[in-house]
Amino acid sequence: MEVEKLCVSYGKKSVVQDLSFCLEEGELLGLIGPNGAGKSTTIRVILGLMKKTAGEITIKGSDQRYGYVPEHPILYDELTLWEHLQLLAATHEVPNFEQEANQLLERFRLSSVRHHLPLGFSKGMKQKVMIVLAFLMKPDLYVIDEPFIGLDPKAIKELIQLLHEEKKRGAGILMCTHVLDTAEKICDTFLLLDQGQCIAQGKLGNLRDQCGLSDASLFDCFDYLTS
Ligand SMILES: Nc1ncnc2c1ncn2[C@@H]1O[C@H](COP(=O)(O)OP(=O)(O)OP(=O)(O)O)[C@@H](O)[C@H]1O
């Protein structure tokens, strides 16, 4: 995915200015920044949920689908968990989805509630359903917004493992998060947004160079660059 000089406004208020970045195959890019920096807005525009004011977003390759894990789970009250998976498989042409779906449900400890309505699910269970739905499709591009919030440690471990597997398969992953210690461990590159502008991007080493702090953690770089 290539984003070039992206600008986004809410009415007259400009919230993203001249944002450019690339997401390569097999790359996990961490989109980080303070509250209100413009991360979710950027994601909404990439997903086509909001219009941009200017700029270009190009998704290369034949697979134009994306796996989206939103910050807040969005599920149908009247469909069971399994019916959600069936619906996604039918609308996104996922062939022989049953085996993959069963494995994902097992990994996220959701097998026993597969025929239940998500109305009675906890916040973390709903979040896990959104993850299973996104990963069932096996798209070339993932857009993931704050996936770790509300997940139990076992589910966090499974999600990190899944991210590794999908990277290995060649998928590009854009992940917005405030959980910097995990991001530091699993992301290949970072894009630090502040007040709608990119103030640093690249590998942790690039961020460290920009701060002049050779052993700094991602948190230290974030703190220094946004102060
Ligand atoms: N619906 C809206 N109408 C007007 N302004 C909005 C709207 N949604 C967000 N904004 C503004 O756009 C800016 C960027 O918000 P955005 O939600 O993209 O930030 P964020 O980086 O995702 O923040 P957070 O880390 O808190 O989730 C903020 O100044 C916010 O007040």
Image: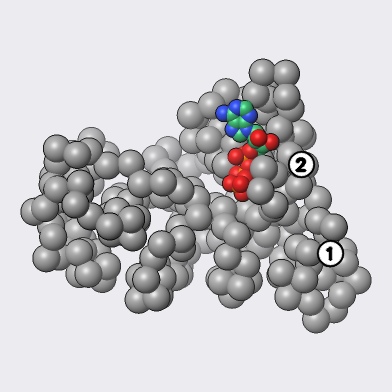
The scheme the figure's colours follow is one colour
The residues tagged by marks 1 and 2 sit, at their Cα atoms, a distance apart of 15 Å
Q: Is residue 24 visible?
A: no
Q: Is residue 9 left or right of residue 147?
A: right
Amino acid carrying mark 1 in the image: Tyr
Tag 1, which secondary structure?
Answer: helix
Q: Residue at x 33, y 55 (%)?
A: 123
CA neighbours of label 2 inside 10 A, class few (<14), some (14 to 19), many (20+): some
Residue wearing tag 1? 224
Q: Relative to 158, does residue 142 appear above or below in the rendering?
A: above
The answer to which quarter of the image holds residue 14 is top right
Report the image quarter containing ligand 1.
top right
Would you say 20 lies left or right of 95 here? Answer: right
Q: Nearer the viewer, residue 149 or 70?
A: 149
**Circle 2 is placed at which residue position?**
195
Q: Give percent across and percent down for residue 5.
A: 74, 33
